[in-house]
Image: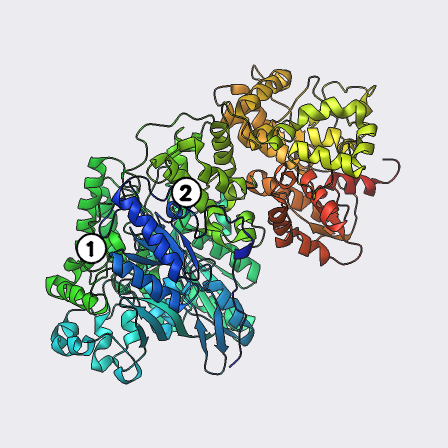
Amino acid sequence: MADAAKGQGPKSERGSGRGSGRDSERGSGHGPGRGSGGVRAGGRGPERGLSRELERELSRVVRGRVDLGVTARALTTMDASNYRRVPLGVVAPRDADDVAAVLGVCRTYGVPVVPRGGGTSIAGQATGTGIVLDFTRFMRSLVSVDAATRTAVVQPGVVLDVLRDAVAPHGLTFGPDPSTHSRCTLGGMIGNNACGAHSVAWGTMADNVHELTVVGAGGGTHRLARGWQNSTSPVGLRDFVIRHLSALRTGYPQDLPRRISGYAMDALLPEHGADLARAFCGSEGTLGVVTEATVRLVESPQARALAVLGYADESAAAEAAPALLPHGPLTVEGMAADLVRVRGGAGLPRGGAWLFVETGGATEAEARSRAGELARRGGALDSLVVSDPAGMRALWRIREDAAGTATRMPDGTEAWPGWEDCAVPPAQLGPYLREFRALLNSYGLHGTPYGHFGDGCIHVRIDFDLLTPAGIGRFRAFSEDLADLVVAHGGSLSGEHGDGQARAELLPKMYGPELVRLFGEFKDLWDPDGILNPGVLARPARLDENLRFEVLPRRPVDVEFGYADDGGDFSAAVRRCVGVAKCRTSQGGSGDVMCPSFRATGEEEHSTRGRARLLHEMLAGEVVTDGWRSSEVRDALDLCLSCKGCRSDCPVGVDMATYKAEFLHHHYEGRRRPAAHYALGRLPEWLRLAAPLARPLNAAARVGPLAALAKRFAGIAPERAIPPLTPRTFLSGLRGRPVPGGAAVLLWPDTFTNHLSPEVGRAALRVLSDAGIEAELPAGRVCCGLTYVSTGQLDRAKVVLRHTLDAMEPYLGAGGEEARPVVVLEPSCAAALRADLPELLPDDPRAARLAASVRTFAEALEECAPDWRPPRLDRPVAGQTHCHQHAVLGDAAERRLRERAGLAGELSGGCCGLAGNFGFERGHWEVSLACAEDQLLPSVRAAAPGTEILADGYSCRTQLAQLAGHRARHLAEVLAEGLGGEG
């Protein structure tokens, strides 16, 4: 048996450790908890005393991490569902002995225990009022892989993609693959009986589990496999099956591939081989705690192809799906046009809905041939067959992002889970969808179905009003009617994500009262004290209680940014995070940025989701009780690089950089700020004052003791070198330059170009001139306000931006005159002008006009000189696309310009880790370095000799110079050099 790499996943031991550890007593209880089952979370008097006593006992017997502090509790109040329950704390066990110890202490105190994986559950089963077991920190080892028997042994915290990557060299993969495969854990998948896109070929989690090691509620260990003789089970379980043979044989719907609801007690029948492991799958943490699992692997096709078939609507697509199944596809996924938010339909074939049908083969030609055959048999309006990996990834990303995209309707209205994954027999899917649409209309609701059409499983987010009593009442009535509709079609209330709190109350409609009564008896055999995830599956909580929105303010909070896409409501902006946790990936995808600080630390509080959860709890005021003054929220946001990666990479467009700036503004209002805010946040002012003294200041910065003193005074990391000032600023070098009348464009003299890299500005002018584009510079002093915004000095930022608008007003095309393009060379400044400016000054029409005028260097060349041909350079490139460019501006024009110039190769994604002021601030060095090592530095090290290192951002160039000794250049510099002659 070959050992696989252990402990893979995020770099969990690098983090700052704030808000964690056994000795954390920071706010170990504030305010009553909500929800059913167990003790209340926090509070004063007896409850607070219980928290302290429980923490002492847990710390005494557990070797892992015990944390009953405010941050840990706030991070785990929610999963990806509509529900919220406040826990007493979080324990990260190191091994099965720790799990047993936690269960022993909690059993003594009558405290519930909730096992939790990636926290991406959509039905509410990963929330609870007691102790949350977090397996993602320590119990995340891939223990072994046996390629010969096609099995792997895993701990519950292993992320699915870690397993798939480890077995790929053997030509194997793991069949179940939810869209959250980059962050969901095997333990969570077992708990929910997860499925994914390939279930038509490889089945559900229960079909792929061979054996489980489970710690029971009483602390004993159960070995669960197929056959009573191969298993150790709770006392009385076999007798229970014998006593209820008739009910178990007749109470379950048949021929339903996605029957996930309820306990799979029928797996214990003799004719089914008494499969205890299968019966445990889908029990949602209510029967025992998995500490190790042996899972089955499947052969991965050597080549794959994807046929995308277009249909008039989702009902037509659903009716076409069953006919494809006999031909052995790997997937038959469906989605409608409502979920495609990419311009031009992202290259999808003609239609209002699509089936994504994947095929496999020994060669690309064979896989493509099978895909083509299915395309011909599918009766589609139009079709597309793709077999190159990049093209397939781009198409699959559209489908996988639907879980987040669906949370916003096309008009921006919020939509929510709750009926996320009903399943009916595939032959019934077309009629079911038509009746489902009719039911939505009868309630005045809207939603866009998508999902696993080949298995009859439908995902949908619906625009429920979960904020008002009337809306919640309608949510309940609709849920009851929809449950009746699903059952009428022979379906399952859950076809993938489990019942949780969202649907368990309605299980009698599907199974009848007698079988549901047996669910309670079944749970009691495993968990007689009722401490394992109470309120879920057996004796469930009501589907309309514990809603996560009820604690939020009913009136908009006073804020500085406009939040136009959220109706000006900061609470609505924070609600954008639904918990799908795309930010919790340990490796960035192709070109992705989000979330660099999580990938550096592995800490939930340093993920976009974690920060959003803390902001949610700050607004709720129950766990985080000191509002904008919260030190817990401040500490979580401290390692946010303000890279804006989440703005584009998060499926629902959470913009944590903006939320951070908003928080810092209120947190430090009327208070002394960190030294770096004054030194780096007001950098444009200091650089203007320093410009005449550039040479002596540069000399002083080279004197070690003087530099150390300056860095200490300014709050700069001691590991950082102070960048040299240019003795001749960009603007001073243009004195005497004739100002062209009626110039085609304005060139923005940003602070970084003017004072730190004037060679970029000179190169840009030269290239623009060669392209026949006359450029003028603004007559007055201008600034994008970026450094003020990133440090939360929003009052000062508004003053600076209003002065800028005054200076720019003559160029903005008032009175019907068309504004000239404003060429901004520094991507972060361009992003600030395009995104932050109109959000900070929404009532000033000049702000919107300036934002609309902003162009990147490549965009200006393409727009103003479409026939210009750049010099042919013919060399490879490496480097990084600026994170703000990726998130706000896009880099399509830059890619086309590089291609025309013969600059071949892809730039890396991620964030350089310097990110303006972030990487210079004291205390950020290690995270800054880890971010650079994530994608940027490895890509540059791997570059062949003679490769051009590109970085349009000043921060990226500085990071490369200081960490790798590479001189990176702006694209304008490279093109200017290619023109020849004098620079």
Q: Residues within 10 Å of mark 2 (few under 14, many from 20)?
A: some
Give the amino acid type for the residue marked by disc 2 in the picture.
Arg
Query: Image height check: is 618 above or below 942?
Result: above
Residue 120 visible in the picture: no
Which element type, helix, strand or loop, lies under badge 1? Answer: loop
Q: Is residue 677 above or below residue 220?
A: above
Residue drawn 80% across the image and 22% down it: 692
Quick one: 358 or 129, which is closer to the camera? 129
What number of labels is visible? Answer: 2
Q: Disc 2 designates what residue? A: 26
Residue 818 occupies quadrant: top right
Tell me if I can see residue 605 in this picture. Answer: yes
* x and y, in percent, of residue 429 in the image: 27, 59
Mark nearer the N terminus (1 vs 2):
2
Horizontal relation, residue 874 to residue 618: left or right: right
- Is disc 1 surrounded by few (<14), some (14 to 19) or many (20+) residues within 10 Å? many
